[in-house]
Image (tube, grey):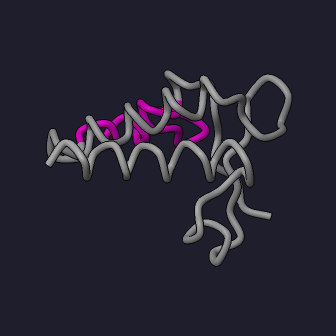
């Protein structure tokens, strides 16, 4: 099962770092941008976001609950990685 975790985190990290979005976000015309520069996040922030996302996924998607209390609807893993998901 740890191999699946590594694949998931690698996929999400590399796509967000290189393209600014995963394949699903590309199809839905969404991007993940850094709050500081409004550009693709750095590798470290993309990795932090992916790790937080999949840890929250294993804990009944608890990181998504934090999106309801934020004015920009940022989830906990987006807040930790200083990122924002936007539509273009």
Name the residue: 68% across, 42% down. 17
| 48 inside magenta stretch | no
Left-right relation of 37 to 44:
right
Classify residue 21 by image quadrant: bottom right
Q: Quadrant of the C terminus?
A: bottom right
Examine the image and state in which quarter residue 6 appears.
Answer: top left
Task: Give residue 33's position: percent from left, percent from top.
Answer: 73, 41
Instruction: Looking at this view, name the residue that lies furthest to the bottom.
Output: 27
Is residue 67 or residue 43 the one in the foreground?
Answer: 43
Q: How many marks?
A: 0
Instruction: Residue at 72%, 61% (x, y): give it.
Output: 87
Left or right for 58, reference 85? left
> Which portion, as a residue range, is magenta?
62-78
Magenta stretch: includes residue 69: yes
Q: Where is residue 13 shown, x and y percent of the image?
A: 54, 42
Pick whichever, 52 or 35, lies toward us: 52
């Amino acid at each position: 099962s740890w191999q699946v975790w590594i694949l998931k985190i690698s996929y999400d990290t590399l796509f967000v770092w290189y393209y600014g979005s995963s394949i699903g976000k590309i199809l839905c015309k969404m991007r993940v941008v850094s709050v500081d520069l409004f550009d693709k996040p750095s590798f470290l922030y993309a990795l932090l976001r992916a790790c937080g996302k999949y840890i929250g996924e294993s804990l009944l998607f608890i990181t998504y609950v934090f999106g309801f209390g934020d004015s920009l609807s940022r989830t906990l893993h987006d807040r930790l990685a200083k990122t924002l998901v936007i539509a273009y």
